[in-house]
Amino acid sequence: MRPSPTGLSEAPKATRRPQVAGLLLAAGGGRRLGGRPKALLDFRGRPLVEHAARALLDGGCAPVHVVLGAAEDDVRAGAHLPGCVLVPNPDWAEGMGTSLRAGLDSLAGTGAQAVVVALVDQPGIGADAVARVRAAYASPSGLASAAYGERRGHPVLLGADHWPGVGEAATGDRGARAYLRRHEREIDVVDCSDIAAPDDIDTPEDLTLLD
């Protein structure tokens, strides 16, 4: 307790936790999987998109926006995504860059100071990795990336000051890659190799990751 001007004791003010949103890119159509949308792949009896969204929520992100594209109606009907904002991306077939732009645009005005970006097709990444990357937040001008050995990957934290530049650079399937390469020296690298695996599902052979 600290004394107030009146001589009475005042409780210290609670430190406000910075608002770090979550953004899940889940619009892909699974072209190399024979047209099976990745969001709807079965993982432990439920659609994979539920696992990825829960990782962001349980990792401390709020709000959590989920970008949908391929089979959007089926995902909305079949996946249970409480606490998430579903963001349509009618241009999903043009590449992941369109989903990243749609997601960042949807976060405008939410008050978020940063966002943790995750991909729907990485079942080995859970809430622990999200929380560790989220904890790297320092300011709206910050950047952070999970690392697995010598390889950087998702989740990625983007301070709000970077969103316009990321959106401008996000074309095709590159997402934020080109922008992050230009700002490599500013990235806070967060080792997650002890708590997560970055393997993604691209081909039918990769479906063993869901076992």
Image (spheres, helix red, strand yellow):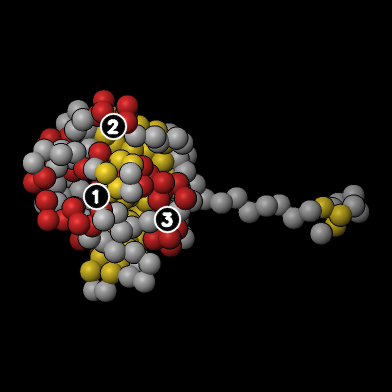
In the rendered image, which residue does mark 1 sit on? 121
Measured in 3D between alpha carbons, the distance from the residue under mark 1 to the one under mark 3, in whole angstroms, is: 15 Å
* Residue at disc 3, secondary structure: helix
* Residue at disc 1, secondary structure: loop
Q: Residue at x 25, y 39 (%)?
A: 40
Q: Position of residue 69 (x, y in %)?
A: 22, 32
Q: Position of residue 135 (x, y in %)?
A: 46, 60
* Residue at disc 2, secondary structure: helix
Q: Quadrant of residue 98?
A: top left
Say left or right for 114 vs 7: left
In the rendered image, which residue does mark 3 sit on? 127
Q: Earlier in the sequence, mark 1 or mark 3?
A: 1
Residue nearest the observer in this picture, 31 or 187: 31
Looking at the image, residue 38 lies above or below residue 207: above
Q: Quadrant of residue 193?
A: bottom left
Could you tell me the amino acid type at mark 3? Ala
Say left or right for 204 vs 183: left
Q: Position of residue 155 (x, y in %)?
A: 32, 56
Q: Position of residue 126 (x, y in %)?
A: 38, 56
Measured in 3D between alpha carbons, the distance from the residue under mark 3 to the one under mark 2, in whole angstroms, is: 22 Å
Measured in 3D between alpha carbons, the distance from the residue under mark 2 to the one under mark 1, in whole angstroms, is: 14 Å
Q: Residue 60 — which label?
A: none
Q: In which quadrant of the rendered image does the C terminus lie?
A: bottom left
In the rendered image, which residue does mark 2 sit on? 75
Looking at the image, residue 167 lies above or below residue 204: above
Q: Residue at x 25, y 65 (%)?
A: 152
Point out the frontmost of discs 3 and 2. Answer: 2
Could you tell me the amino acid type at mark 1? Asp
Could you tell me the amino acid type at mark 2? Val
Say left or right for 201 vs 134: left
Looking at the image, residue 155 lies above or below residue 147: above
